[in-house]
């Protein structure tokens, strides 16, 4: 299922510090009791505090070419510096984290899963113009897989054109790998795998 960027639900932050574009979530409701959620946020300077999400595991990626500084648990000795080239950064939703950006705005990509229901994995892939990559979906078993375009543009299976912010959701019934071809320099993708916790 193709999820276009211009169809994502837009939500302004209560503190005025940014706007979230929700890519997908389950269950698809207006409540905070989601099992998983994928989103892209436009964050405004200078910074502030992350919302606390008890029972949630999070992974954060910086999409735009800007710097993000995270201060953990209020300690100036525990500062994490993230940028577009950083590995995805995972942390517990209960953590007390403040953020600071030095540019006017910053774009990030965020994955959240309820710890008792799902676990997730985020892979950051960089591609050059005309470079091709095969995304393995045949071994996904019970997993739900998303391919999100962070920068640039790509063509996926059957000529599907994808631009910044577009996402391709792949469920368990998919019967073949996904072939991706980059149509721009410095194309960046995020591959998310959501695996249910089986009781």
Image: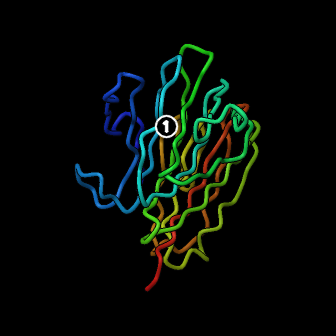
The image quadrant that residue 33 belongs to is bottom left
Q: Nearer the viewer, residue 180 or 57?
A: 57
Q: Nearer the viewer, residue 27 or 80?
A: 80
The image quadrant that residue 134 belongs to is bottom right
Left or right: where does residue 30 sit relative to residue 111?
left
Q: Residue at 58% across / 24% down in the picture?
A: 100
Q: Position of residue 64 (x, y in %)?
A: 61, 28
Left or right: where does residue 21 sit relative to residue 32?
right
Classed neighbour count for the residue bearing mark 1: other residues with Cα under 10 Å, few (<14), some (14–19), many (≥20): many
Q: Secondary structure at mark 1?
A: loop
Q: Position of residue 156 (x, y in %)?
A: 57, 51
Q: Position of residue 167 (x, y in %)?
A: 48, 47
Is residue 172 shown above or below 49?
Answer: below
Q: Quadrant of the C terminus?
A: bottom left
Among all residues in the image, which is located at the extreme bottom?
199
Q: Quadrant of the N terminus?
A: bottom left
Q: Nearer the viewer, residue 34 or 8?
A: 34
Q: Residue at 46% across / 83% down in the picture?
A: 198
The image quadrant that residue 121 belongs to is bottom right
Q: Residue at 61% across / 67% down in the picture?
A: 177
**Residue 8 seen anywhere in this rendered image of the structure:** yes
Is residue 142 shown above or below 112?
Answer: below
Residue under numbered circle 1: 165
Numbered marks: total: 1
Left or right: where does residue 72 sit relative to residue 117?
right
Q: Position of residue 82 (x, y in %)?
A: 69, 35
**Residue 161 seen anywhere in this rendered image of the structure:** no
């Amino acid at each position: 299922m193709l999820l276009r960027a211009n169809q994502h639900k837009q939500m302004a932050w209560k503190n005025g510090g940014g706007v979230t574009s929700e890519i997908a979530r389950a269950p698809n409701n207006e409540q905070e009791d989601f099992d998983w959620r994928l989103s892209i946020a436009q964050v405004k300077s200078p910074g502030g505090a992350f919302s606390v999400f008890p029972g949630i595991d999070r992974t954060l990626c910086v999409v735009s070419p800007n710097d993000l500084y995270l201060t953990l648990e209020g300690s100036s000795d525990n500062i994490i510096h993230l940028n577009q080239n950083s590995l995805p950064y995972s942390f517990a939703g209960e953590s007390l984290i403040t953020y600071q950006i030095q540019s006017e705005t910053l774009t990030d990509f965020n994955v959240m899963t309820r710890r008792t229901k799902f676990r997730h994995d985020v892979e950051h892939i960089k591609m050059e113009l005309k470079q091709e990559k095969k995304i393995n979906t045949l071994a996904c078993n019970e997993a739900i897989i998303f391919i999100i375009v962070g920068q640039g543009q790509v063509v996926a299976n059957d000529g599907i054109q994808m631009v910044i912010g577009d996402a391709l959701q792949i469920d368990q019934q998919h019967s073949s790998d996904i072939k991706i071809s980059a149509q721009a320099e410095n194309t960046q993708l995020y591959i998310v795998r959501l695996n249910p916790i089986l009781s």
